[in-house]
Image: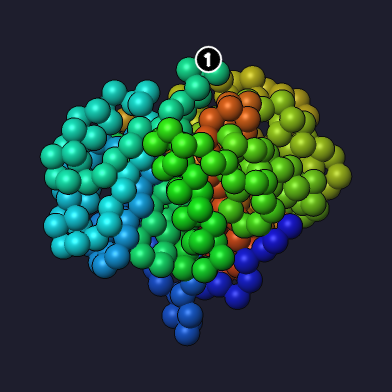
């Protein structure tokens, strides 16, 4: 498995006693800042900054795009000469108003051609602005800023280039000219086409010997559940936080507990979600759009990224510890 090294990242760990509190992202004070982890509502500060500072290109692929302020930001980028392109999912009703608004602002937009027979969605959450990108689990919905979620900002050239190629793949498909990329092994993984995210997740799980710390919106995939139990049996400390408002999680919760895995319900604030899809496997952090479900790992178009940066690992581990404590017994 390819791992990103020598990256600098910091995640705010302030005020963790209240899981509903928005925690700002902090910049690590190193000489290089190739990677930065953002969470919760602060993600939208990143989004606005990336769009607002772009000079050449902005590429957006977003499952849920309903925020009028971000639509305006995209239109303003076009007005100053930036090449802006947007891909949305047709199954989200609110996207229709946004795409109409984008058209009126001169923003080039296309709709991803999902496979209705498989109940597929384009679940990707991706923003590329000039030479950097933001990838994770946060939608651009009207109330997405209430949710607990993560996004990784990266300036790592090889990763940004891979993300650009994936966007171009999807743009071509949405334009009626499919050109799927070959399967690749690296720090960026996609699903449908291919099964790169399942392979990335399985590899991380199989090699985890000390710890697995996961926060997952929906966990139903039987292979992943079995691998979590197996990691526990070989001596890893496995802890899983789930969103209690997803009824499909109940079975996974019960199976994990029966297998000896420590699992708790995240204390979700009113009208919010634990929307993250993130796991720490010893020294590897994997996050993105894919839920740990059959659909997320095999049907939907999804996008995940991993990093082995030690600062990122420690930051997430500390935040997870606070979330675990807040979840109680």
**Visible residue check, residue 318:** no
Quadrant in which residue 225 is drawn: top right
Above or below, comparing residue 278 to residue 83 in the picture:
above
Residue 297 lies left or right of residue 150; in this view the side is right
Above or below, comparing residue 323 to residue 90 in the picture:
below
Residue 94 lies left or right of residue 201; in this view the side is left
Quadrant in which residue 64 is drawn: top left
Which quadrant is the C terminus positioned in? top right
Residue sitting at the far right: 234
Q: Nearer the viewer, residue 226 or 70?
A: 70
Q: Nearer the viewer, residue 136 or 16?
A: 136
Residue sitting at the far front: 177
Above or below, comparing residue 204 to residue 193 in the picture:
below
* Residue 15 spot, x, y in % from top left: 38, 57
**Residue drawn at (32%, 60%) of the image:** 57
* Model colouring: rainbow
Q: Nearer the viewer, residue 218 or 83?
A: 83
* Residue 53 spot, x, y in % from top left: 25, 66
Q: Nearer the viewer, residue 66 or 23?
A: 66
The number of numbered badges drawn on the structure is: 1
**Residue drawn at (55%, 47%) of the image:** 304
**Visible residue check, residue 179:** yes
Above or below, comparing residue 5 to residue 192 in the picture:
below
Residue sitting at the far top: 117
**Residue drawn at (33%, 37%) of the image:** 110
**Residue drawn at (55%, 18%) of the image:** 118
Q: Secondary structure at mark 1?
A: helix
* Residue 72 spot, x, y in % from top left: 16, 48
Q: Which residue is mark 1?
A: 117
Which quadrant is the N terminus positioned in? bottom right
């Amino acid at each position: 498995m390819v791992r990103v090294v020598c990256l600098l990242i910091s995640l705010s760990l302030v005020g963790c006693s209240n899981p509903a509190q928005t925690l700002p992202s902090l910049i690590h004070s190193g000489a290089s800042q190739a990677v930065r982890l953002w969470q919760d509502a602060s993600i939208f500060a990143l989004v606005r900054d990336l769009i607002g500072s772009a000079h050449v290109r902005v590429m957006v692929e977003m499952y849920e795009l309903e925020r009028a302020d971000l639509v305006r930001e995209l239109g303003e980028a076009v007005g100053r000469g930036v090449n802006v392109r947007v891909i949305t999912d047709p199954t989200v009703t609110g996207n229709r108003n946004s795409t109409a608004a984008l058209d009126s602002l001169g923003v080039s937009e296309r709709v991803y051609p999902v496979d209705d027979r498989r109940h597929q969605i384009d679940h990707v959450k991706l923003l590329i602005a000039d030479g950097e990108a933001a990838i994770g689990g946060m939608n651009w919905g009207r109330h997405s800023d209430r949710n607990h979620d993560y996004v990784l900002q990266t300036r790592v050239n090889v990763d940004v280039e891979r993300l650009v190629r994936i966007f171009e793949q999807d743009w071509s498909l949405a334009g009626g000219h499919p050109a799927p990329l070959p399967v690749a092994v690296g720090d960026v993984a996609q699903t449908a086409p291919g099964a790169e995210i399942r392979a990335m997740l399985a590899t991380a799980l199989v090699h985890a010997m000390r710890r697995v710390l996961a926060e997952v919106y929906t966990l139903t995939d039987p292979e992943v559940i079995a691998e979590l139990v197996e990691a526990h049996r070989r001596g890893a400390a496995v802890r899983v936080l789930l969103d209690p408002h997803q009824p499909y999680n109940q079975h996974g919760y019960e199976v994990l507990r029966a297998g000896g895995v420590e699992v708790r319900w995240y204390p979700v604030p009113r009208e919010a979600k634990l929307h993250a899809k993130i796991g720490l496997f010893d020294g590897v952090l994997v996050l993105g759009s894919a839920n740990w479900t059959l659909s997320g790992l095999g049907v939907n178009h999804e996008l995940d990224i991993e990093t082995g940066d030690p600062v990122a690992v420690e930051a997430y581990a500390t935040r997870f510890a606070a979330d675990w404590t807040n979840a109680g017994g």
